[in-house]
Amino acid sequence: MTNEPATQATQGERDTAGKKSVLIAACLAAGAGGWGLTAAGADAGRLSEAYDTDLITIGLLTTVLAIPYAAMQLPAGHLVDRFGARRTAFFGLALVILSYLAAAAIPLLPVAFVARILGGAGSAVGFVVGAELARRARIGVVGLGAFGGAAIGFGGLAIAVIPALEPALGWRSAWLTCAAVAALALTLVWVCVPAHIPSKPHPTIHRVRRPVLRDWELHRLGAIHAATLGLGVVLGNWAAVILHTRWNLPFGSASVIASLILLMTMASRPLGGFIASKYPHCLRWVLPASLTVCAVATAALYVPSTPLAAVAVVLSLGLASGLPFAAVLRGAQLWRPDRPAAAVGLLNALANTLVVLGTPLFAAAIQHEQIGTALFVVTALWLVPIVALPRSLKSAVDSRQSPQRADLP
């Protein structure tokens, strides 16, 4: 009996260590997709030389990854709900590894395109698996924010790491690092995640559940996620060009400043999780305030000023766009306890569809000297989700107010 407190403390330490391990595995599983999304652009010049093609064609290597990445989000959610995170991760991340190894071994452009298509599909599985692991690990909404920050932050890390490895790996640095990150993620998922995680029975819900695709409350949540993630990525891609052409900043400085939009979310997403966890009643004004700040900052990009002002604008975008992430994804998981992975898949599908459509359209606007029009449209899109804010979010995130879902993490 005298050893019981020590035994309980030891067990608690093991549980905490296990949660941290699963969280790291979740971050890497999702981060593999973020890394792959920017990998081709990070070494575009060298890839252009290796494949003897122009930069526009190399840019298409990002597009052909983004399309299956968006399209596979919801199917990936169904697979995770059906077969479990560990088994689904194995096949999804293994597909990523094999695809990029083939692209590195065979220096042919068609092989690279096929590898990016398959890599995009596998990376979609990785993100949904990561979100499900984060939920299963009971890390709370703050941990979910950390997961989200890592998922998008890996894209920023790729931009810095891939060129640095080019002297050693040559033009293959983009593809080999994509395979390496996916391999590390697969290893950690396989080691840290139990082969079988017993599922608790879902509570009886006294209403008919619509299919995920026709659940309008999920679409309200998805509108916020699509704006904050989708528009954030679109602006992250083109802010450097805007700062260079309209603000007359050197392109190198403009690129560094623009990168802060995505890098800032590594801090703002966990911060948003903290707010949702400790002050859930504040979500009713935090979410619309975040979207409004993003709209104002986007409009400010059209008005040239000093480099310090440019930094302030992009930091505002990064901070405000990251705050809703954890609350929205957590809300989707708890709103659909019967299909949590599919719910997350739907949200991410909507966001990445906006990336797929918005990135080339914004590029076309820049090419036709219509930056002002493009920024006006994006400014308006930030405000659209405010019209139909989710009604379930506060009670869903604050599980203490939802006794019927108290068994969920």
Image (cartoon, helix red, strand yellow):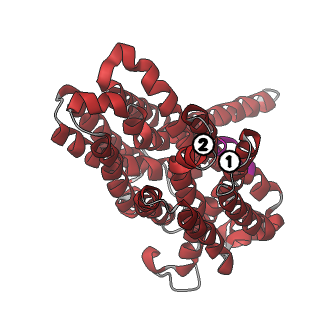
State which quarter of the image contains the N terminus.
top right
Q: Residue furthest top?
A: 168
Foreground of the two, 251 or 59: 251
For the point 32% across and 40% down, the residue is 55
Q: Residue at x 33, y 49 (%)?
A: 65
Q: Tell me if residue 62 is in the magenta stretch.
A: no
| Looking at the image, residue 350 lies above or below residue 114 | below
Residue 133 visible in the shown view: no
**Which is nearer the eye, 389 or 20?**
389
Residue under label 1, please give it: 314
Look at the numbered discs 1 and 2 and tell me whether their residues touch, using CB distance below 8 Å: yes
User: Which image quarter holds the C terminus?
Assistant: bottom right
Circle number at residue 258: 2
Mark 2 Cα shell of 10 Å, populated few (<14), some (14-19), many (≥20): many
Residue 304 placement (x, y as % from top left): 69, 51
Kindly state the secondary structure of the residue where label 1 is placed: helix
Q: Amino acid at mark 1?
A: Val
Percent x, y of residue 223: 57, 70
Chief secondary structure of the magenta portion: helix
Q: Which residues are magenta?
A: 264-271
| Amino acid found under the numbered disc labelled 2 | Ala
Residue 266 shown in magenta: yes
Above or below 371: residue 172: above
Give x and y (percent) for residue 403. Answer: 72, 70
- Horizontal relation, residue 305 to residue 249: left or right: right
Residue 286 locus on image (x, y percent): 78, 64
N-term mark: 1 or 2: 2
Residue 314 at least partly seen? yes
